[in-house]
Image (spheres, grey):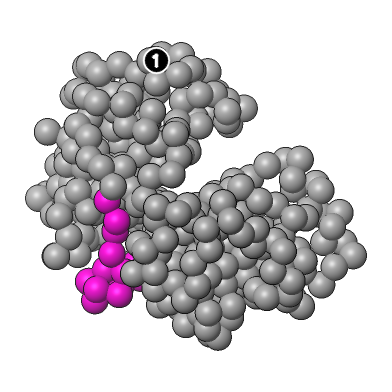
Amino acid sequence: MQAAYYTQYGSPDVLHYGEQPTPTPKADQILVRVRASSVNPIDWKVRQGELKLLTGHSFPKIPGRDVAGEVAAIGDNVTRFRIGDKVYGMAADGVGGAAAEYAVLAESSAAFIPQQLSMEQAGAVPLAALTALQGLFHHGRLLSGDRVLINGASGGVGSFAVQIARALGAGEITGVCGPDNQELVRTLGADRVLNHKEHDFTTDHSRYDLVFDAAGKSSFSASKNALRRLGRYVTTTPDPAALVTGALATAFSDKSQSMFLAKTSGPDLALISAWLQAGTIKPIIYKTFTLRDLAEAHRLSEKGGAPGKIVLTVE
């Protein structure tokens, strides 16, 4: 199969396009003919070597976590899917594997693509939407009526988080983004939109029940004064130093912090699919690249500030 891959950690220049072995599905996996994927910050952070303690030094590596396409083969124990089904999901391998003509998904973590979604739209969903849902609900314990702030509200995760916070019944949603993306965040359902260049949300004393830092630009220590009693701070960017500092800060506080990376989850993706089917949430696509142009897509993602998702099409 054709795939994007790299044989050493480094800049986008280490990415190559060429022949790689087609994966074989295990008994509980499906092989997907990939039609679309997307670029998430975790992809280029792994490629840069930031997580090499977790991802190791075995090469070549194929980046990408988001998979959308048709089932090409099924493992011996698979019962829910048939060859030809249109499916999507997040690759469980922490390195990736989606930036290729074929990728494997665990049956338990895959879902049928909602009928009204194109392959490109489906490719924009899994990791970002799962991160938003798990951050707000599982880690942030969002309750109906809560005041929620989403930092990085126009990005891939943030754009889903604004919509999902509304779907979960948040009472007031404040989105933080750059000046060029404020109108987008309003259309997604934010009640208040803050330009991060003009307003520091951490100075909003005791306003929020939940701060969801989808941009990974703040910290619990900086945000705690903006939280109300029993407030929660959640970030998608685990940082060992910030974790230690935050743990010391929470020891003498009625407020809490959580740092996490999204996990594959069939039930979570099924809920997301239901919301997509009903039109409650929608993916926001900023720009589309072909798989051959993955290096350029990584460079754009690394610059930051892109509204919504950067999508890859796989011919």
Q: Which residue is mark 1?
A: 14
- x, y (%) of residue 214? 53, 54
User: Which residue is outermost to the right?
Assistant: 252
Quarter that holds the N terminus: top left
Decide which of 24, 104 is in the foreground and name it. 104
Query: In the rendered structure, which amino acid carries the disc numbered 1?
Result: Val
Q: Residue at x 70, y 52 (%)?
A: 219
**Secondary element at image label 1:** helix
Vertical placement of 27 versus 52: above or below?
below
Magenta stretch containing residue 98, yes or no? Answer: no
The stretch in magenta equals: 271-285
Residue 196: horizontal and vertical position, in percent? 56, 54
Question: Looking at this view, is 217 or 257 the one in front?
Answer: 217
Residue 314 at least partly seen:
yes
Quadrant of the rendered structure where residue 294 is?
Answer: top left
Quarter of the figure with the C terminus: top left
Which residue lies at the image location 38% right of the left edge and 15% below the top edge? 13
Any part of residue 102 in sight: no
Label 1: how many Cα within 10 Å (few below 14, some 14–19, many 20+) = some
**Side of 281 where 252 appears, left or right:** right
Residue 95 vs residue 119, the one in the foreground: 119
Q: Quadrant of residue 297?
A: top left
Residue sitting at x 45%, y 64%: 161
Report whether 45 appears left or right of 203.
left
